[in-house]
Amino acid sequence: MALANEPFIIDGLELSNWDRDFLLDLHKGGVTCVHACCGLWENARETLSKIGEWKRFFDENSDLVMQVHTGGDILKAKTSGRIGVVLGTQNTSLIEDELSLVPVFNQLGIKIMQLTYNNQNLVGSSCYEERDSGLTRFGKNVIDAMNKEGVIIDLSHCGTQTTLDAINYSSRPVAITHANPDWIYPSGRNKSKKVLSALRDNGGILGLCAYPHLINGEETTLSEFTDLIKQTVDFMGVDKVALGTDLTLNMSEDFLHWMRMGRWTHEINYGAGSASQPSWPSWPSWFQTPSDFPNIREGLYETGMAEKDVNAIMGNNWLQFFTAGFEANKGG
Amino acid sequence: MALANEPFIIDGLELSNWDRDFLLDLHKGGVTCVHACCGLWENARETLSKIGEWKRFFDENSDLVMQVHTGGDILKAKTSGRIGVVLGTQNTSLIEDELSLVPVFNQLGIKIMQLTYNNQNLVGSSCYEERDSGLTRFGKNVIDAMNKEGVIIDLSHCGTQTTLDAINYSSRPVAITHANPDWIYPSGRNKSKKVLSALRDNGGILGLCAYPHLINGEETTLSEFTDLIKQTVDFMGVDKVALGTDLTLNMSEDFLHWMRMGRWTHEINYGAGSASQPSWPSWPSWFQTPSDFPNIREGLYETGMAEKDVNAIMGNNWLQFFTAGFEANKGG
C-alpha cells in the first residue's frame, strides 16, 4: 500500500501551548501532522519573532517534531515517527499592506493564512463585523499571490460576503480549517448552507471543530460530535470533511486576552465565548488532550462508517488537500 | 571536466542598482554569480521589504537571474546561463538583538552577513570607530548561529580587534569579501598583514576590491590592479584570493547618504570618500560596467599567471568557498 493511502491523523488547527509534553500527547494520539497557529494579530516584525521561536522549538525537539512545507514532508514525518507541524496564521496582519511579503512568509513556511481574524482588516471582513464589505482590492492581490505561491487560503473566521467572494475569486480550492455548520450548531462563527455549498463546489474542505463554544460546550457527547461529522459528510461529501479541533490546551489568561482583544480594543471582548463563560472553555471528556484522537476514530467506527471514510475524515483528506495546496503554481 | 572545474566569474560584492540592463551587462561579462548587498543599516522589518523586492526582481526576470542558496544553485545558474545572486547584508542590523533571527533570515537566503557596517553595533566594532572593543558576547552567539546555519561571516568593514576576535572564535573559515591589503593601498578600510595572516591561517578568503577609494582612484591602471592581485597572492596563497569589486553603478545621491549616514548621524560623513570626493567615485576605464570582467582576466594572463590560477581568482575560489560555507553544520 502506498504510504499516502495508509491512515493518517491530521488536525486542521491547534492553538495550544506547544511544549515537549504536548508533542508526546500528540504522538500518543497517533497524530502525524497539525496546522499550528503562528499568529493572530501579529504584524510582520512580531511574526518574524514567532517564527524564530518555532524554529528553535523544532531544533530543540527534532527527535519528536519537524516543520512541514510540502506534502512530502508530511510523509517524511510519518515514516520518521515525528509530528509534522504546518505553520499558519489566523490573520493576514503579518503581511501588513505589502504584497511582496506573501512569498517571503511562504518561504519561511507560513503555508496557511486565514484572510481575516475577528475584525475588518485590509483584505476583508470578519464574521463579527456588523457589515461585511467583502474582499478588498488588496485582498484580491493577496489571493492571487497565495494561489501562485501555494499558501492555502483559510476562511474560518471570515464574514459571509468575504468568504463567498474569496471562494469565487480564488483560482484554487480554499479551506475552512475550523468551523461547523451553523444549522447544526448556531453561532456567528459557524457556516451557513450557502457558504458550505460554495466551499464544496469550489473543491474546498471543512475542518470540523471541537472548540466547546462552537458545539454544545463540554457536555457535548462523542456521539453528538460524530453525528455532526456524519451530517456534514451527508451535505459536503466524504472527501470534503476533516477535523480542525481548534484545541487550546494550557494557554494563559494573558493569551486569551490577546486572542480576543489584540490591540484593537481596551474593552473586554468574548469572541466565541460570553460573559457567563469568560475564560478558556473546558473540553469534552472524550477530547481532553490530543492523545484522545483515537476516541473520535472509534466513535466514527461505532456509527457504522466504512474504514476508508473514517481515515479520510481523520487525516487523509487533509493529506491530499495540503499536498496539492502547498505546491507552487508559478505558471498559473 | 566536472562543471565545478570549468572557469567561473564570481564577484564577492556588488552594490549597484540592479535592473534588467545590469543583468545583461553581467551576462555580457561572463559573470555567473554575484554577492549582492541586501542591506546596510536596515532593521528586521526593513530587510523583509528588501527581500520582498528582490524576490519580485528574481521572479520578473527569471530568464536572466536566479537566487542562490547553495553551491549547487551556482552550478544551476551556470548551466542555465543565468546570473546567480547571493543575497547578503553588510551589517547584522537585520537581526536586531534577536539570536533566533539568524536561522530565519538564512532561510530567506541571506547567506552572507558582515558583522558590522561602519559603526559600533551589538556584535562588534567597525574600522571607523575610535576604539574597537572587539567581538561582544552577543557577537559570539551570532557567530555560533551563523556557523551552524551556513551563513558566511564577512569582516570587510570590521575593526581590527573585532576581525581578529571573529577569525579566532569562528569554527568555520570566514571571508573578507571586499578589501585590499593596507600596505599596498593605505586606508582604514583596508587590511593589515596581521589581519590577513590570521585570515589565511583560518582558511578564509579575501575578495580584492576595485572600489576607487580603496585603490588609487579612477586613475589606477589595470596593471596596477593586477599587480595588487599578484602581491596579495604571494602573501595569501592563490587559493585564498578572489575578487569583490564593490561595484556601485547607477546609484542615487540619496542612497549614498543612506550608505554613509544611515540614521546614526545628521552630519555629513564621507566613509571611504572625502570632502574633496564627496560623491560616488568614477571607476577606472578598464572597469566601467560588469561587462568589463574579461579585462581583468586578460590583465592577469598578461602577468604570466597560469590559467588555473587566473580561474581560481576570477571565480573558482569563491565557488569552492561559497559551496562549503553555505552548507548547514547542524551537527557541529
Image (cartoon, coloured by chain):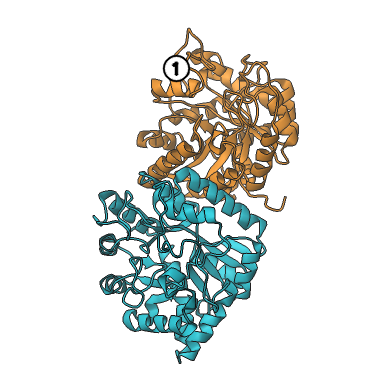
Chain colours: A orange, B cyan
- The quadrant the N terminus of chain B occupies is bottom right
Q: Tell me residue A106's x, y (percent).
A: 56, 45
Q: Residue furthest front?
A: B276
Instruction: Inspect this view and state whether residue B331 appears.
Output: yes
Q: Tell me residue B42's x, y (percent).
A: 46, 48
Q: Which residue is drawn at 62% across and 15% down?
A: A185
Q: Name the residue under label 1.
A: A282
* Chain to which mark 1 belongs: A
Q: Is residue B103 left or right of residue B191?
A: right
Comparing B108 with B287, the one in front is B287
Q: Residues within 10 Å of mark 1 (few under 14, many from 20)?
A: some
Q: Which residue lies furthest to the top in this view?
A: A276
Q: Name above or below for residue A275 compared with residue A284.
A: above
Q: In this view, does B43 lie to the left or right of A328?
A: left
Q: Tell me residue B156's x, y (percent).
A: 37, 64
Q: Which residue is drawn at 56% across and 17% down?
A: A215
Comparing B304 with A320, the one in front is B304
Q: Type of residue at label 1?
A: Ser
Q: Name above or below for residue A330 compared with residue A216.
A: below
- The quadrant the C terminus of chain B occupies is bottom left
The quarter of the picture where residue A101 lies is: top right
Q: Tell me residue B213's x, y (percent).
A: 43, 69
**Secondary element at tag 1:** loop
The quarter of the picture where residue B135 lies is: bottom left
Q: Name above or below for residue A320 compared with residue B174.
A: above
Instruction: Inspect this view and state whether residue A3 appears.
Output: no
Comparing A163 with B7, the one in front is B7
Comparing B47 with B318, the one in front is B47
Q: Is residue A155 left or right of residue A258?
A: right
Q: Residue at x 40, y 37 (%)?
A: A23
